[in-house]
Amino acid sequence: MRIYYSLLTLIILLASCNNNQQQKEAEKNATTDEQVSKEIPRNQILSNEQQIAAAIIAAPKKAREEAKVYGYDTEGKLIVLREGSNEFICIADNPEKDGFQIVSYHTSLEPIMARGRALVKEGKSRKEKEETRSSEAKSGILKLPESPATLHIYYGKDGYFDTKNDSIINAKYRYVVYIPYATQATTGLPLSPNVSSHPWLMFPGKYNAHIMITPTE
């Protein structure tokens, strides 16, 4: 009987030690997560120069210095921060939105992008915006790119611009190649990725059909 109670006591002690260890590890992980969260700048307010430096990172290297750049003023209004002289347009991260996103796209996509921004400003829902652009594209009112046109995007919920090193942190890169009205039959692409990094065709047959490519690195 004494042996039984001794074993039972030992088991209880071991269980207690294990629970204490797990609690300490949980507290340590929570502290680490909290520290990391505090170190990540949220809704960054950047100067015009910093917005430009961040936005152009989404563009191909040789196109950065001459690209047009949109950014946000102190009231949150989208404005032109720098005029461009090549075929690229960049847009800085919107500090009023959670997460991080910068984009760069070919100028032939500007009619689609500008119309989308105008409809959002009018208070249209996403569905209404797409219906309007689709209708205007079919009627010829909305000009579409005549050749494949690419949008480059850096995005991430914990992403931010490292102002000390002029680099993007915690963000993924994606290529979006627009080919209006493209289908699986005309491109030979799958309608979903074979694996996460493989190209695939989104919105086949529509005015905004595009190839999605999300590299793993």
Image (cartoon, rainbow, N blue to C red):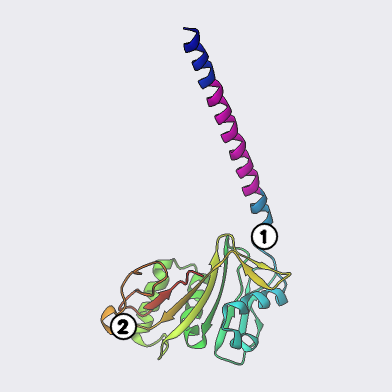
- Residue drawn at x 58%, y 92% is 86
Amino acid type of disc 2? Thr
Please state which of residues 27 and 132 is positioned toward the viewer in this rendering.
27
Q: Which residue is mark 2?
A: 187
Residue 106 in picture, x, y percent from top left: 51, 85
In terms of secondary structure, what is the magenta stretch mainly? helix
Please state which of residues 36 and 67 is positioned toward the viewer in this rendering.
36
| Label 1 secondary element | loop
The reply, left or right, for residue 160 in relation to residue 105 is right
Query: How many discs mark residues in the rendered view?
Result: 2
- Residue drawn at x 28%, y 78% is 184
Amino acid type of disc 1? Pro
The reply, left or right, for residue 68 in relation to residue 49 is left
Magenta span covers which residues?
Answer: 12-34
Measure the C-alpha gap from mark 1 to mark 2.
41 Å
- Residue drawn at x 60%, y 84% is 61
Residue 29 in picture, x, y percent from top left: 61, 44
- Within the magenta stretch, is there residue 67? no
Please state which of residues 29 and 185 is positioned toward the viewer in this rendering.
29
Please identify the quarter of the rendering in which residue 21 is found: top right
Q: Which residue is mark 1?
A: 41
Please state which of residues 95 and 141 is positioned toward the viewer in this rendering.
95
Residue 30 in picture, x, y percent from top left: 61, 43
